[in-house]
């Protein structure tokens, strides 16, 4: 079997992720930091270490500025709904995932104005086009770091600079890049970074977080949830300090134990080396597909402009036909359709049909890429 | 040895304080909050009383929020 659906959730995981979760269940198990006993402290220590590991990964100086959530979707909702008020204006791109578009369309109905900057057909964005959309009421820019449809990288560093110059908040959806492409919140000028644990950070599902930069006044950011934090229990008001202000309720501690192991795996391998491996593989895949006339490839051709996710279509076949043939006959698991991003498909011209998507990981081998190119060739022969 | 304890608003700060102090070779330990003091986070950091100023400035630098330093009787 070949698993090419890592952009949805990475699999397999490094063995240490499962081991950390089993260890947590066998030896720690308690409610983190609520009770002051040995196991409660150990559970809280796991979460502390996870905050530190992720701080190192994203160059966050103060780990309390990372708050844990269930996934990127929750982080994006927290940042958008917590920060925007009626009368505010926000700028985004036409390549966004529904985890960005849907909260924005919801907020539009509540009096927040939205500008969607069109991207080119390969998903790339011209920062100058984005800057033209900035108005006096603009409060925030939100962009995905890389598209889950085409793998296209957006120029976050350039846009981060624009945001700084214009005194706007910059929110980046790093669901597809955290762990797979270098992110430095300071150099990239990112004020809010939403990440998910179950993709390129190799953690389990149900883990994610939001980095809240020093430029964000946390009193301006309304929590999505209020409730118990294990701190300030004598007061009925929500704590006003990080990370507790945004972490009500018992967290997914066993999941975060796995996320810590995943983040440490990424730090040990090095994001640059993971990136190099994945780039080489995606380049081979593109090379292999380029010679096949019945295949249409989407996204930038040059690997430096993309991550290891590739969308394509095969003449006269629907994406779901291709995916089920690949699974049944060749054991290749991939994802067909719209990938929760209708706007991105309109941008690249594949709406409503969608595409077939192959997404690789650090565990993908050269052999698997070769086999998959062969499989697609076979499939075309059969159809001839 | 005379000890003191530092109280924190939440366990995050207690754990960060312990880690940063140990990295500097200071002999500190997380202990349950003594009964006559009250802190909701359940644990506090026991420190050598004579090191309290060193630790206070270290923790300030490391952005650790504190809720007071008390002499441990
Ligand atoms: C670009 C992008 N943003 C956000 C998300 C949402 O991530 P999650 O489902 O973990 O919340 C995804 C993944 O599905 C994604 O690809």
Image (cartoon, coloured by chain):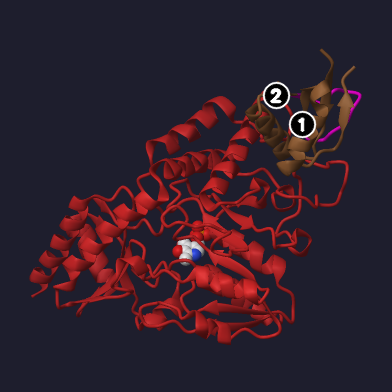
> Residue sitting at 80 percent across and 34 percent down?
B56
- Which chain contains the residue that carries disc 2? B
Crowdedness of circle 1 by 10 Å Cα count: few (<14), some, many (20+)? many
Q: Is mark 2 within 8 Å of ligand 1?
A: no
Q: Which residue is drawn at 68% across and 47% down?
A: A64
Is residue A87 left or right of A148 when viewed as pictured?
right
Q: Which chain is brown?
A: B
Query: To which residue does mark 1 refer?
Result: B55
Whether residue A333 can be seen here = no
How far apart, in angstroms, are the residues tagged by discs 2 and 1? 8 Å
Work out whether B73 lies above or below B15: above
**Chain of the residue that carries numbered disc 1 in the rendered image:** B
- Write down the colour of chain A: red
- Residue A349 image position (x, y, % from top left): 35, 84
Task: Look at the magenta stretch and give its main secondary structure.
Answer: loop
Most foreground residue, B50 or A329: B50
Residue A213 lies, with reference to residue A252, above or below; the image says below
Secondary structure state at the residue bearing disc 2: loop
Foreground: A283 or B52? B52
The residue pinned by badge 2 equals B26
Q: Quadrant of residue A167?
A: bottom right
Judge whether residue B34 is colored magenta.
Answer: yes
* Label of residue A345 in the image: none
Q: Which of marks 2 and 1 is nearer the N terminus?
A: 2
Does A42 sit left or right of A23 as displayed? right
């Amino acid at each position: 079997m070949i698993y090419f659906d890592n952009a949805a959730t990475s699999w397999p995981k490094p063995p240490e992720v499962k081991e950390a979760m089993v260890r947590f269940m066998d030896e720690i198990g308690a409610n983190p930091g609520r009770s002051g006993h040995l196991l409660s402290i150990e559970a809280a220590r796991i979460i502390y270490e996870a905050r530190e590991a992720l701080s190192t990964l994203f160059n966050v100086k103060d780990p309390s500025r990372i708050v844990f959530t269930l996934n990127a979707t929750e982080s994006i909702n927290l940042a958008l709904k917590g920060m925007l008020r009626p009368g505010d204006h926000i700028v985004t791109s036409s390549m966004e995932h529904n985890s960005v578009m849907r909260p924005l369309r919801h907020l539009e109905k509540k009096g927040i104005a939205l500008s969607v900057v069109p991207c080119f057909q390969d998903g790339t964005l011209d920062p100058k086009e984005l800057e033209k959309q900035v108005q006096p009421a603009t409060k925030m820019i939100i962009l995905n770091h890389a598209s889950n449809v085409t793998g296209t990288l957006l120029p976050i560093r350039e846009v981060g600079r624009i945001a700084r110059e214009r005194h706007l908040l910059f929110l980046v959806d790093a669901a597809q890049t955290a762990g797979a492409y270098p992110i430095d919140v300071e150099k990239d000028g990112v004020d809010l970074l939403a990440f998910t644990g179950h993709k390129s950070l190799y953690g389990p599902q149900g883990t994610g977080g939001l980095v809240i930069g020093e430029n964000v006044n946390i009193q301006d950011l309304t929590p999505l949830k209020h409730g118990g934090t294990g701190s300030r229990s004598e007061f009925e008001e929500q704590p006003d300090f990080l990370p507790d202000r945004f972490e009500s309720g018992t967290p997914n501690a066993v999941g975060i134990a796995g996320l810590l192991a995943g983040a440490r795996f990424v730090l040990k391998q090095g994001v640059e080396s993971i990136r190099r491996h994945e780039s080489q593989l995606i380049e081979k895949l593109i090379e292999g597909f380029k010679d096949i006339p019945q295949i249409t490839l989407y996204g930038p051709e040059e690997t430096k402009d993309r991550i290891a996710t590739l969308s394509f279509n095969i003449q006269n076949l629907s994406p779901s036909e291709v995916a089920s043939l690949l699974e049944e006959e060749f054991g290749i698991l991939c994802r067909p359709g719209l990938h929760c991003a209708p706007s991105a498909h309109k941008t690249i011209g594949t709406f409503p049909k969608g595409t077939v998507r192959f997404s690789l990981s650090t565990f993908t081998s050269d052999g698997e890429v070769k086999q998959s190119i062969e499989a697609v060739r076979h499939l075309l022969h059969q159809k001839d | 040895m005379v000890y003191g304890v530092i109280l924190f608003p939440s366990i995050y700060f207690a754990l960060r304080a312990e880690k940063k102090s140990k990295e500097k070779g200071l002999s500190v330990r997380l202990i349950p909050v003594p009964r006559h003091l009250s802190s909701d986070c359940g644990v506090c950091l026991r420190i050598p009383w004579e090191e309290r100023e060193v630790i206070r400035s270290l923790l300030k630098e490391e952005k650790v929020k504190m809720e007071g330093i008390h002499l441990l009787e």
